[in-house]
Image (spheres, rainbow, N blue to C red):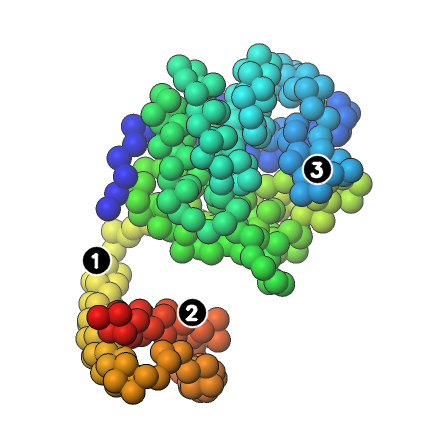
Amino acid sequence: MSIQLELEPFVFEGVSKERPLVLAGPCSAESEEQVMETARQLKERGISLFRAGIWKPRTRPNTFEGVGKDGLHWLKKVKEELGMLTATEVANVNHVFECLKFGVDILWIGARTSANPFAVQEIADALNGVDIPVMVKNPVNPDVELWIGAFERLNQAGIKKLAAIHRGFSTYGKTFYRNDPHWQIPIELKRRIPNLPMITDPSHICGNRDMLFEVSQEAMDLYFEGLIIETHCNPDKALSDASQQITPESLKKLLSSLVLRKANVDNTVISHTLEDLRQQIDTFDDKLLEVLGKRMKVADKIGAYKKENDITILQSSRWDQLLTKRIMDGEKKGLSEDFVVKVFRAIHQESINHQTKIMNE
């Protein structure tokens, strides 16, 4: 079911309306010289939206946590001298008031803050009656309802220019990414709030500059509206997240290399071909559901038999053997191990749910 929010277009005077909308600038404002030099180089390469962190919520203390209020003077100078719009992160009411005082154009709420409804509500209350665009990063944990709740709180406070920032999700253990993109979650958010712009943050998803293009291209292939990319005049010397920042020139090369595909086509032959293929997918999906329904009926019989004979629901060795075999079979059919594991874990959990219900009857 879609969510109805009262939204206005997330567009800005003097900023190109062509996709992607790009916000760029350093992870952290470190000095006036660094901010102004980075902004000048970005301006020369056609970027109009300048982002910089003023307060940096670090995981552990005794690390660089931003320059604080002093950095707002530098953002104001970027705006006055270069004519760029400025954006920064706010995590509490005091941040909001300081940013409004210095004329920051766009605010964003970070992943740690968006995971806390109390903090989001306090920020929403502080912005009540203020006409300012606000972007909300996904919560650190993969929870689309929590993300939606943040937008609802802001919208109820009268904020109508809203956008989502997809920055990936924290995971336990090593992955290819600093924060796993879990693309299905921003896709679900777009399904629920279709007119909400989606801006992907490849810098925080990747955690390194080597994969930025790949993630940016995938965001464009999903027809997301924009990108927010950390850019620094001297990335290797950055005081925070040096490995994921790029130079303004590298940003220009990345953006020029993106392939921007069309959401729809007017060609009748292409449309008919896609429709035929989609009908085939629908047929397979119907068969999948039919087979899964039959499978669960067998699970019900197993549950009843286990109850009758006082046998536990979970048989760990059986589950391990089944999953190992399914992974091998899936690879032969061109299916990735990650996909097979996720599918069969979901099926196994549903089987357990069915058997638990029978046990409790």
Q: Amino acid at mark 1?
A: Thr
Q: Nearer the viewer, mark 1 or mark 3?
A: 3
Task: State the SS at label 3.
Answer: loop
What's the residue at 52%, 33% (across, down)? 109
Contact (CB < 8 A) between labels 2 and 1?
Answer: no
Point out the residue furthest to the top here.
101
Q: Amino acid at mark 3?
A: His
Dot label at residue 268: 1
Residue 127 showing in the rendered view: yes
Q: Position of residue 55 (x, y in %)?
A: 65, 29
Task: State the SS at label 2.
Answer: helix
Q: Which of the two residues, 64 or 161, is positioned nearer the viewer here?
A: 64
Tell me the crowding category of disc 2: few under 14, some 14 to 19, or many 20 or more residues within 10 angstroms, Cα based.
few
Dot label at residue 232: 3
What's the residue at 47%, 24% (across, down)? 122
Q: Amino acid at mark 2?
A: Lys
Q: Which residue is mark 2?
A: 342
Mark pair 2, 1: CA separation: 37 Å
Q: Nearer the viewer, mark 3 or mark 2?
A: 2
What's the residue at 41%, 17% (across, down)? 128
Mark pair 1, 3: CA separation: 46 Å
What's the residue at 71%, 42% (across, down)? 60
1 or 3: tag closer to the N-terminus: 3
Name the quarter where the C terminus is drawn.
Answer: bottom left
Q: Quadrant of residue 92?
A: top right
3 or 2: tag closer to the N-terminus: 3
Q: Position of residue 315 (x, y in %)?
A: 42, 82
Task: State the SS at label 1.
Answer: helix
Horizontally, residue 224 falls left or right of residue 230, namely left
Dot label at residue 129: none
In this picture, is 114 found above or below 300?
Answer: above
